[in-house]
Amino acid sequence: MADSKLRAQVVFATITGNNEAVADDLVAHLEERGVLVEKSEISQSEPEDLANYDLAFLVPYTYDEGSLPDEGLDYFDDLADVRLDHLVYGVAGSGDTFYEDFYCLALDKFEQQMEKTGATKAADLVRINLYPSPKDKERLAHLVDQAVLKVTA
C-alpha cells in the first residue's frame, strides 16, 4: 500500500470514451494503492498544475494520421515550458490498429514532451487497441505499480 499522502493527476482526452475508460482504470489502480487521485479532461487542465502532484498519467488519443487531440494542443505546447523534476509520469491511451503506422502516435509525442519537463518516466507507454481488455488492465496496473515504486524509492 502506498503512502496515502501521494497525489496523482490523470489527464485524458477522448472522443469515443475509450480513453476515459483507460483513465478510469488508472484511477482505480491508483486508489487501490492508497494514492489520492484527481482525474481531469485535458481541455480543463493546465500543465503547471502537475507541480502539485507526485505522479501524473497522460491519456491522449491520436486523431487522423498521427495528429494530437485538438482540445489538447495548448496543454501539449505548454508542457514544454514547465519544470517537473520531482514528478513521475506515465503515458497510456487507446487507438485503433486499423491506422497501422499512425497507431497511438500521440502517446509517443506526449512522452517526448514530458521528457522535456525533467519528469521521470515510470515505465514504457501503454498502447491499447480500442477499449481496454483484461490484459490491458493488467498492463495499466503494472504502469501504476512502476510509477508508485519510482516515486517512493
Image (cartoon, grey):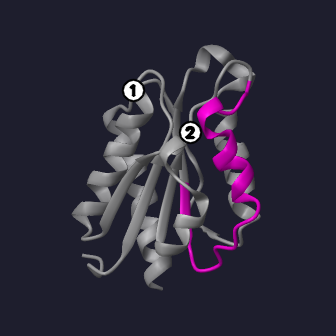
Check the picture and name the quadrant holding the N terminus: bottom left
Q: Quadrant of residue 80?
A: bottom right
Q: Give the alpha-carbon distance from disc 2 to disc 1, as whole Å.
A: 11 Å
In the image, what residue type sits under mark 2? Pro
Residue 38 placement (x, y as % from top left) = 35, 58
Q: Residues within 10 Å of mark 2 (few under 14, many from 20)?
A: many
Does residue 137 lie above or below 10 as drawn? above
Residue with the mark numbered 1: 17
137 on left or right of 41: left
Residue at 71% in and 72% down:
118
Residue with the mark numbered 2: 60
| Nearer the observer, 5 or 108 | 5
User: Would residue 70 be counted in the magenta stretch?
Assistant: yes
In the image, what residue type sits under mark 1? Gly
Does residue 151 lie above or below 30 as drawn? below
38 on left or right of 14: left
First-in-chain label (2 vs 1): 1
| Nearer the observer, 97 or 73 | 73
Does residue 43 lie above or below 96 as drawn? below
| Nearer the observer, 68 or 49 | 49
What are the residue bounds of the magenta stretch? Answer: 66-90
User: Would residue 150 be counted in the magenta stretch?
Assistant: no
Residue 51 placement (x, y as % from top left) = 55, 73
Residue at 50% in and 76% down:
150
Q: Secondary structure at mark 2?
A: loop
Please, which residue is most extreme toward the bottom here? 153
Residue 120 appears in the rendering: yes
